Amino acid sequence: MPTVELLFSALPEHVRTARLVAAAVARRAGVDEAVLDEVRLAVGEACSRAVGLYRSSGADRPVRVVLTEEEKKFSIEVGDKSPEAEDRPADAASVPSARGDSPAEHSEPLPDGSPSSSDSSEAEDEGQMGLAVISGLVDDVEVFSGEYGDVIRMSWPLNPAALS
Amino acid sequence: MDLSLSTRTVGDRTVVEVGGEIDVYTAPKLREQLVELVNDGSYHLVVDMEGVDFLDSTGLGVLVGGLKRVRAHEGSLRLVCNQERILKIFRITGLTKVFPIHTSVDEAVAATD
């Protein structure tokens, strides 16, 4: 059972609320203070991405954020999980590798395109950059396929000694 | 916390002072401001991020969009930022290679490449 579960309408103005809740629950769970900024940012990225995907696909679904305090880690899942996704292993191909190996390769900050590129292509760039930020920040990330798009699961160790 | 924006002219540069949180909700306001400045003929921008409490990839996308726009007019977009947690986001996305990042507005205004 999750420690805290949050459902919000897929609107940009609610992403900040999700960040605040996630940071508060993470702090209470014992996530190191130094890491809370990363938790806040990663959750914001995952929620922004979900909001963008749901809106562009016209899915009238809330964004689901599940915050779970486990024995040795704190995990956050963002997205809407379909029943079959439960059995499916992580889609390793769709998640950029974790921090360490040249993070810049995951993002193309200045893709070829005219300076007057449309807002939609900028939005796509932002979606890609969101994943790049998450993969650069969080060591333990999995992306599952869900019925309404990806489910991103991230976790952080709770044992301060493991953080160094 | 919302986004605050103010602009002022220093020589041939336009300084945009940004405060608060730049995220998926507030970033469109920053985008509008940058588009408006470029449309009005301000092609040399200095974005002062010292008052920014939070920045995500949506904000990065807007800054990259601004850079594309000023470059189309042979302009420049320089950032002022000393906050480690904000700088980290530029580093992990490789954008420190794309934006000139300065430690003060004076330095950014004086910079010529």
Image (cartoon, rainbow, N blue to C red):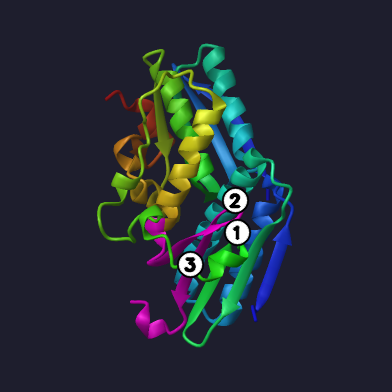
Region rendered in magenta: A135-164
Q: Is residue A41 above or below residue A36?
A: above
Q: Label 2 crowding class (10 Å Cα cut-off): few <14, some 14-19, many 20+?
A: many
Quarter of image, res A81: bottom right
Question: Dot 2 falls on which chain?
Answer: A
Q: Is residue A12 left or right of residue B89?
A: right
Residue on which disc 2 sits:
A50
Question: Decide: marks 1, 3 in contact (CB < 8 A)?
Answer: no
Q: Where is residue A60 drawn, in percent x and y?
A: 74, 48
Q: Label 3 crowding class (10 Å Cα cut-off): few <14, some 14-19, many 20+?
A: few
Work out how far the residue at label 1 is from the one at label 3, CA to CA, in angstroms. Answer: 15 Å
Question: Dot 1 falls on which chain?
Answer: A
Tell which of B82 and A25 is nearer to you. A25
Q: Is residue B7 above or below residue A147?
A: above
Q: Where is residue A111 drawn, in percent x and y?
A: 36, 30
Q: Is residue B12 left or right of residue A6?
A: left
Residue on which disc 1 sits:
A79
* Disc 2 secondary structure class: helix
Among numbered discs 3 and 2, the one appearing first in the sequence: 2
Work out how far the residue at label 3 is from the one at label 2, CA to CA, in angstroms. Answer: 20 Å
Q: Where is residue B107 drawn, in percent x and y?
A: 36, 34
Q: Residue at x 42, y 39 (%)?
A: B80
Q: Residue at x 31, y 51 (%)?
A: A103
Q: What amino acid is found at the position of numbered circle 2 in the picture?
A: Ala
* Disc 3 secondary structure class: loop
Among numbered discs 1 and 3, the one appearing first in the sequence: 1
